[in-house]
């Protein structure tokens, strides 16, 4: 379950996934995906993360203000373009004075953006570059990799350093059952050193921390803004220099650091607790309230209520675009079963669109609205200030109390009311606080659940276009209200997809996340 949360985090700027560049969530974010990566040919490849450097090999020395020095081994033999880019930027002093703008406990710390927002940065060559991936390098704790916007061809200057968690053998078997091919050697690493196995094959890993991993683990516990995972106090990279390995001790594993206690900082200090307020997703609609009617070709009509009292800018933007006919004829360009359907991009790629005012706008978040099944929210590129026209409608999953308690252990705080909703109606709880929710489906949720099962190919794009014929603004006239999928006769969130289609979708899928987030 938690892999969906974090698969949205390593982004840099785009709205390709439900979330695009960097998000929690997976950042659903605009580019995050929960699908599997086929690494079957990698099963016998030897893992190189912890191979010792030779004397005079090029290494990176990173000094972090108020924390200390981190040293990183590089792998030009497996990530030549990635190493060349990072070394070139470091030699220019590009990273000096920048911050770690996104930090998620038990996942990673991300930096390298001159704007400090998760939306900036470029390679040494200008723009983006393709660093590829290599099966010799995995996302073990201490791995250094590039954030991207859904593909390694969108690498720039942003990078992240993995902390992750120690997996159980059951965790690994669950990943394998979901289509991840994790070698026995990788399994041993993930069950002892820890890491984030579901990112393998989607991001360019090019280095491994060999000194100062305790510093990285300390940084991951800083207090952060629940809306965008930005540290409340800047974590500043004083300098990044290119040096030579001179035979220093190698301390690859957090257990190598004497006296380091992963629980030294209380868990509750890692994030700011959300306000305990009543959830309003399913509150009554009054006659005359503005609502949206969306006709989807070959599927039917979906109606959702709006929440101007909690998302005034978000509602104003959607109504304004709808009244212009902006959404008419566009598609749902990204669909992920048991997660969400995403549309609103005139380019149909996840990288386009703008608000009614031109460019982006900040819709903020409100704790009265959560990511319950049927909620409607804006995709963003790592912060609600990057909202545009792209939106998503949540399907999600029903969670057990144990699942939600596990999220709490990772720093997520849910009210009792929210927990009841997620354990009955379902949704995507890890997205709360990171995206602007502005609506809730009250009729046609069965249509959304049907669309989520469509066959998809690369980038989670439906093989056959799912077309939004029209989006109209109207008024609620007292019609039937059906908030929950259980309200629809004959509907089932477990409706099977044809076996052939399911297999094709799995083969074509790839996990993106993160760059900037869902979304």
Image: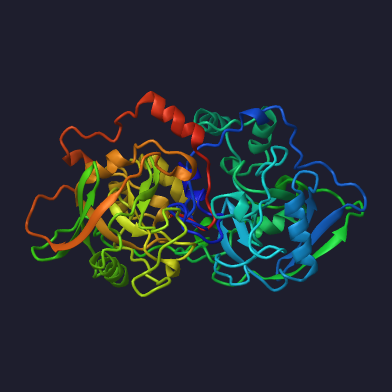
Is residue 389 left or right of 381 when viewed as pictured?
left
Q: Quadrant of the N terminus?
A: top left
Quick one: 201 or 278, which is closer to the camera?
201
Image x and y of residue 88, in percent: 78, 63
Quick one: 211 or 464, which is closer to the camera?
464
Image x and y of residue 225, in percent: 48, 66
Check the image and report above or below for 462 versus 40: below
Q: Residue at x 64, y 63 (%)?
A: 127
Task: Report if residue 481 is visible in the image.
Answer: yes
Q: Quadrant of residue 92?
A: bottom right
Is residue 262 left or right of 456 when viewed as pictured?
right
Total numbered circles:
0
Image x and y of residue 130, in percent: 66, 52
**Render colour scheme:** rainbow
Q: Residue at x 58, y 44 (%)?
A: 199
Q: Residue at x 18, y 32 (%)?
A: 490
Q: Quadrant of the C terminus?
A: bottom left
Quick one: 258 or 375, which is closer to the camera?
375
Task: Report if residue 258 is visible in the image.
Answer: no
Check the image and report above or below for 318 versus 449: below
Check the image and report above or below for 136 versus 22: above
Is residue 66 left or right of 107 when viewed as pictured?
right
Is residue 298 left or right of 419 when viewed as pictured?
left
Image x and y of residue 481, in percent: 13, 50
């Amino acid at each position: 379950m938690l892999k969906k949360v974090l698969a949205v985090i390593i982004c840099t700027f785009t709205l390709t996934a439900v979330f695009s560049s960097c998000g929690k969530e997976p950042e659903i974010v605009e580019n995050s995906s929960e699908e599997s990566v086929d690494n079957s040919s990698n099963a016998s490849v030897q893992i190189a993360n912890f191979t010792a450097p030779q004397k005079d090999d090029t290494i990176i020395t990173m000094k972090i203000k108020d924390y200390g020095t981190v040293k990183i081994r590089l792998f030009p033999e497996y990530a030549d373009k990635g190493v060349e880019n990072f070394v070139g930027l470091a030699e220019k002093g590009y990273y000096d004075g920048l911050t770690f703008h996104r930090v998620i406990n038990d996942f990673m710390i991300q930096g390298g953006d001159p704007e400090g927002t998760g939306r900036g940065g470029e390679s040494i060559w200008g723009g983006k570059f393709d660093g590829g991936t290599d099966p010799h390098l995995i996302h073990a704790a201490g791995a250094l990799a590039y954030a991207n916007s859904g593909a390694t061809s969108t690498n720039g200057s942003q990078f992240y350093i993995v902390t992750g968690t120690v997996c159980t053998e059951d965790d690994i078997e669950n990943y394998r059952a979901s289509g991840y091919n994790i070698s026995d050697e990788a399994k041993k690493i993930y069950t002892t050193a820890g890491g984030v196995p579901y990112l393998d094959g989607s991001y360019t890993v090019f280095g491994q921390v060999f000194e100062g991993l305790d510093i990285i683990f300390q940084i991951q516990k800083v207090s952060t803004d629940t809306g965008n995972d930005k540290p409340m106090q800047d974590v500043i990279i004083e300098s990044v220099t290119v040096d030579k390995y001179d035979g220093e001790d190698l301390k690859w594993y957090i257990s190598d650091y004497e006296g380091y206690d992963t629980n030294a900082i209380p868990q509750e200090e890692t994030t700011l607790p959300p306000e305990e307020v009543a959830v309003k997703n399913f509150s009554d609609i009054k006659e005359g309230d503005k609502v949206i009617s969306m006709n989807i070709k070959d599927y039917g009509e979906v109606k959702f209520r709006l929440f101007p009292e909690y998302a005034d800018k978000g509602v104003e933007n959607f109504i304004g675009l709808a009244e212009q006919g902006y959404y008419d004829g566009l598609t749902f360009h990204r669909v992920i079963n048991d997660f969400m359907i995403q549309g609103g991009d005139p380019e149909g790629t996840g990288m386009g669109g703008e608000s009614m005012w031109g460019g982006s706008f900040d819709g903020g978040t409100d704790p009265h609205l959560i990511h319950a099944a049927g909620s409607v929210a804006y995709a963003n590129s790592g912060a609600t200030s990057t909202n545009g026209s792209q939106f998503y409608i949540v399907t999600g999953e029903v969670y057990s109390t144990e699942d939600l308690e596990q999220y709490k252990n990772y720093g997520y705080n849910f009210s009792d009311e929210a927990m009841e909703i997620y354990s009955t109606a379902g949704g995507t709880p890890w997205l709360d606080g990171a995206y602007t929710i502005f609506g809730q489906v009250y009729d046609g949720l069965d249509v959304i659940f049907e669309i989520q099962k469509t066959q998809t190919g690369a980038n989670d794009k439906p093989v056959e276009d799912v077309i939004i014929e029209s989006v109209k603004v109207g008024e609620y006239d007292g019609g039937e209200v059906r908030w929950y999928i259980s309200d629809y006769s004959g509907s089932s969130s477990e409706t099977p997809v044809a076996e052939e289609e399911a297999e094709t979708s799995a083969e074509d899928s790839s996990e993106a996340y993160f760059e900037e987030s869902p979304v």
